[in-house]
Amino acid sequence: EEKLIRNEKKYRSLFEQSNDAVFIIRSDGRIIDINKRACMMMGYTKDQLQNMSFFDLLIPSEKEKIDEYLAQFTANGSIHGETKAITSKDVCIDVEINATVLEDHDDTVQVLARDITDRKLAEENLLQAKIAAETSSRTKSEFLANMSHELRTPLNSIIGFSDALMEGYFGELDPKQTRYIQNISNSGKHLLNLINDILDISKVEAGKMKLFPESTNIDSLLDEMVSLVQPLAAKKEIIINVSRDPELQTMFADKAKIKQVLYNLLGNAIKFTHRGGRVIIRTNINGNMAQISVIDTGIGISPQDMNRLFRPFTQLDSSVARRYEGTGLGLALVKELIELHGGHIWVESEVGKGSNFTFEIPLKKAAN
């Protein structure tokens, strides 16, 4: 009897001090006991609640589900979920409940209830903020895409006419005029490349970038890319080597987009490698993925800069890196295009010893 009394006092202490509202109810819903937290949450006195059914506290639409809840409770012996209750002041609150049969009392149920109204409101606000941010991002991307198209038209004219002048179609130019026209052409082409990168990133972010994947021969793709960047490498006496995995012959990819990825990676490797350095292209098979690495002996990347590499419009702040031109769009676009293929890209680097950019994309077409 003493042990029973001690256990009862202990239970009563926990019952009253609980941070959750506790309802002890009969199987028909009639409330037979509650703690102080239940009275505070619902705005009723203890006597008032003990003259009510637990179901009386639910909003009308939830009362219609009582039979469903009872069937679930009978089948499982417990129930956990969320519902909506109405307080004495006619305020609707969100409530999380855990109901279990009280030990040794088959017709008595203990219901733990927690007011989660503030949490639900915070979740709704976060969701609305997320939707607003995504809408804003799409609007920005669509604006940039449209603006890029508008800018490319006059730029193409500037580049076309300046190149025509340099070719002498409108008469011979003296050295000074040639130099000035060359500057106009180079600046126009640089600006056009920037606009094209912005357009591509905007398309990806707006969900308008489309892939046209096909079975692509990797050897011919790499040969084409080496030929394309060889003049850039030759200016700095950089040697380009290709290490091929003989078992890797083809991959399923949008050839034009992969060429864009490789041109960006190879261009960066050459740009950040000192005169007389080396750039290596290496291919491998990793499971069902084709793996291509672009390795250089350049300036390398510090650990603190690694996480910022693939962010749009971000350039590294090291005094060495700032000597080089760049918009900070190339690697961001590379990442987007690789992920669009269902692959991923990562980098390993050490300052002063070079970098290794590796990406993987599926070897074969994904099964429908």
Image: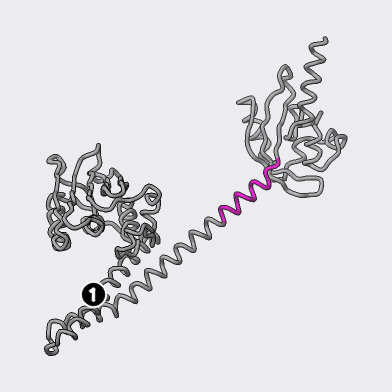
Q: Is residue 39 a member of the stretch shown in magenta? A: no
Q: Which residue is mark 1?
A: 186
Q: Is residue 116 a member of the stretch shown in magenta? A: yes
Q: Percent from the top left, x then y, of residue 90? A: 78, 49
Looking at the image, is 14 positioned above or below residue 158?
above
Range of residues picked out in magenta: 115-128
The quarter of the picture where the N terminus appears is top right
Q: Percent from the top left, x then y, of residue 249? A: 14, 45
Colour scheme of this structure image?
A: one colour
Indicate the amino acid at tag 1.
Asn
Q: Is residue 212 visible to the viewer in this orientation of the structure? A: no
Front residue of 368/305: it is 305
Q: Secondary structure at mark 1?
A: helix
Judged left or right of residue 18, residue 366 is left
- Please tell me which residue is depicted at 70% across the width and 41% down the height of the picture: 115
Q: Which residue is most to the right?
A: 47
| Number of on-image labels | 1
